[in-house]
Image: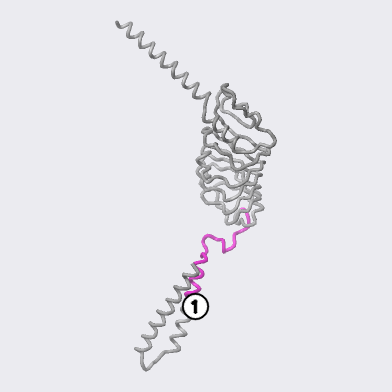
Amino acid sequence: MRKTSVSTLLKLLFSFLITTQTYSANNGTTNGTDIQCLQTLKKSISDPNGYLLSWNFNNSTQGFICKFNGIDCWNENENRVLNVRLANMGLVGHFPSGLEMCTSLTGLDLSGNNFSGPVPTNISAMVQYINSLDLSFNNFSGEIPTSISQCIYLNTIYLQHNSFQGQIHDELTQLDRLSSFDVASNFLSGPIPAFKAQFPADNFANNLGLCGKPLNDCPMSLNKKSLDTGEVVASTLGVIIGFSVGIVISSFVDLENPRITWAFYLYSCKKLMACFFRICGKVF
């Protein structure tokens, strides 16, 4: 009875191990989401030069996508994408779709193509584990998404030679691992944030509106500690109104009847303040 129980237990254990190994192998070598990722990516862009002709999905061989042009896998025998490297292929379109399904992606290189339009604001949800992002030498436009700061493993960001506009957001300084950052030749403006690492001036060159280290100092009008436009206008109006009140009061002072003078002073202030708020309402 005891021998039978031990034998049965060993058989169950052996069966469990075989099942586990089979599941692990299948899960690693036939990762359907990565295949869907590349299928969606290919459909979302135009390939006028035929560089992606090798992307033939009529295949069930383990690791077949690893032989695609521009694709690196973690292991050549499993359909799990490590890097997407599509540099200098003359590809056309917007930022590719489907990358969120390449769940193990660590590198994305789209440089030297004809991509245009904005980079998705949710890029961090699409490629959250990447350590290298290269979108250089395209025609991407709009602002650099602040959500890039949530791609916490990023070591390198190359955005040079595009048409990005707006400011370099302070949130990007939260990327502790960032060792290389290049935004040269765009249409960026405003102060350069204080990154933890130091980047050369060439990495910010040819952005006429950028200022601050390592470029020239920002003018006072762009200094974050200076007064904003609303504060300056309000202060100026305050001085003008105070001066006007003084002139009005001095013109109507009646030393023989101070009660009349005081009443007129309050009345004048009330009228001038009403005028002040009407002006502020139009300015702001």
Answer above or below: position of 179 versus 229: above
Quarter of the figure that contains the N terminus: top left
Instruction: Locate residue 226, reporting x and y percent.
Output: 52, 64
Q: How many discs mark residues in the rendered view?
A: 1
Magenta region, residue range: 214-240
Here the colouring is one colour
Asked whether 67 falls inside the magenta stretch, the response is no
Answer left or right for 6 relative to 34.
Answer: left
Q: Is residue 151 above or below residue 227?
A: above
Look at label 1 and name its amino acid: Ile
Residue at 54 percent of width and 36 percent of height: 98
Pick the front one: 83 or 224? 83
State yes or no: residue 225 in magenta.
yes
Q: Which residue is mark 1?
A: 240
How far across and how far down the image is residue 82, in percent? Answer: 57, 31
Whether residue 261 is situated above or below residue 95 in the rendered picture? below
User: What is the residue that sits farthest to the left in this orientation?
Assistant: 1
Query: From the viewer's perspective, is 12 left or right of 162?
Result: left
x and y, in percent, of residue 91 in the image: 66, 39
Q: In the displayed orientation, state which residue is furthest to the right.
A: 49
Q: Secondary structure at mark 1?
A: helix
Rendered residue at 64%/38% (across/down): 46
Front one among 145 and 279: 279
**Mark 1, other Cα within 10 Å: few <14 / some 14–19 / many ≥20:** few
Q: Residue furthest bottom?
A: 256
Q: Judge from the rendering whether residue 261 lies leftward or rightward of residue 179; answer left or right.
A: left
Q: Residue at x 64, y 30 (%)?
A: 69
In the image, 57 versus 262, the foreground residue is 57
Give the x, y percent position of residue 27. Answer: 49, 24
